[in-house]
Image (tube, rainbow, N blue to C red):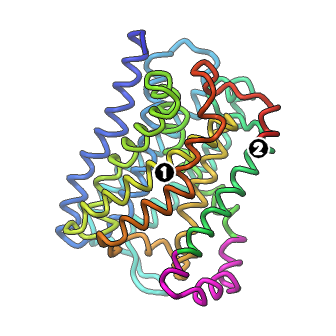
Amino acid sequence: MNSKTDKKQLLIFLIVAYGVTFLMGFIMWYGRSKHLDLTAFVNTQMMYPAAGVMLAYLLTRKNDSDMPKLFFLSFLFITALMLISSILTVIQPEKILEMPGGTVSFWLILMQLIMMGGSILCWIFMLISGKKRRKAYGLDGKHWKASLLCILLFLVLYFLRAGIGFVSAGQFNVFTEILTSLDTWIYIASMPLNFLLVFVAFFGEEYGWRYYLQPMLQKRFGLRAGVLILGIAWGLWHLPVDFLYYVSPEQGFIMLVSQLITCVTYGIFFGFVYMRTNNIWAVVLIHFFNNNLAPVIAGTYTADVLQNQTVSWSQIPWSLVINGLLFGLFLLAKPFRKKERDICSFSISDEQSL
């Protein structure tokens, strides 16, 4: 990062990705004190990293004709709408709708519509931007053979980790019941359509972390150290949701430690996938599967399983060992042994050595 432009871009990214996140954290704290549902803040927070990158590019590359400006502007517009709606869930929590199954927050329903409509709008603007613009800003899909293999590998490791967890708890029968349940497969069958309608959230994280920040850190600190530093930065970024959403504030520090283990080890695997494929959509899909398979493993088939969890220090060593073995060992993989100049410069021939 030698130029003033690079430094300005990084500053804008940090202000949006971290500054907005932690400012919203204060509003989350107020909402938590009032026992309000904070799901809106979690979904919106996922948008900030990509929004930071896009805003940085729009402000520092104004004359770049290859920039997919309409896509960037539409994403920023959706992010702003979701941010405002998140704040309104705390300011006017009494605004509710009567539904057949009970009452639901008007703002949460509105945000779901914004995300679905916004995803469709972003797909349209990204597609009409043209192949040249998509390629110039890392939006083109490439090396799909290697990408699909990486996604499949993640799914195998994900379910292997879940299976180990059930076995260690003496509940392997529960695991097999989940995998053989019709509800499980109906849920899984709906995931492709679900992805199309909510992709902006998962793209929001990965375009910021993997596309923008990972190569920058790797060029500065090396291939392995760059990914490890990114994992720590990614984990700390979750601090507001760790203390105020996933668990009660009293267990927040334990959750933060657990989050750091997850983000560092996952960051290694995600980093491996991105270096291996140079395809941002591969890691976006993996991130989507990771988040959306959690309700399947829990047997609840609802995202509510992510909030108000219970964690303990006894879970930390298990998490460190299992995640370290299944995902952390990819730090020894071939892409991390490449020269610094080869970052994000992988050829089709590399697909044969996965």
The percent coordinates of residue 253 (x first, y second) are 24, 60
Q: Are marks 2 and 1 in contact (CB under 8 Å)?
A: no
Q: Is residue 186 left or right of residue 4?
A: right
Between 142 and 262, the one nearer to me in the picture: 262
Q: Identify the image quadrant of the C terminus.
A: top right
Magenta region includes residue 157: no
The percent coordinates of residue 92 (x first, y second) are 26, 64
Q: What residue is rendered at 39% in x and 58% in y?
A: 42
On residue 265, the disc is 1
Q: Quadrant of residue 242?
A: bottom left
Q: Quadrant of residue 38?
A: bottom left
Magenta part, dominant SS: helix
Q: Identify the image quadrant of the N terminus.
A: top left
Q: Which residues are magenta?
A: 165-189
The percent coordinates of residue 112 (x first, y second) are 50, 62
Q: What residue is rendered at 64% in x and 34% in y?
A: 335
Magenta region includes residue 181: yes
Residue 190 versus residue 124 in the image, above or below: below
Count neighbours of disc 1 (C-alpha within 10 A) and say few if under 14, some if 14 to 19, many if 20 or more.
many
Q: Is residue 18 left or right of residue 223?
A: left
- Residue type at mark 1 is Thr
The percent coordinates of residue 305 (x first, y second) are 44, 75
Eye-nearest disc, 2 or 1: 1
Residue 247 versus residue 121 in the image, above or below: below
Between 280 and 112, the one nearer to me in the picture: 280
Q: According to the image, label 2 marks what residue?
A: 146
Residue 96 versus residue 69 in the image, above or below: below
- Residue type at mark 2 is Ala
Q: What residue is rendered at 47% in x and 87% in y?
A: 101
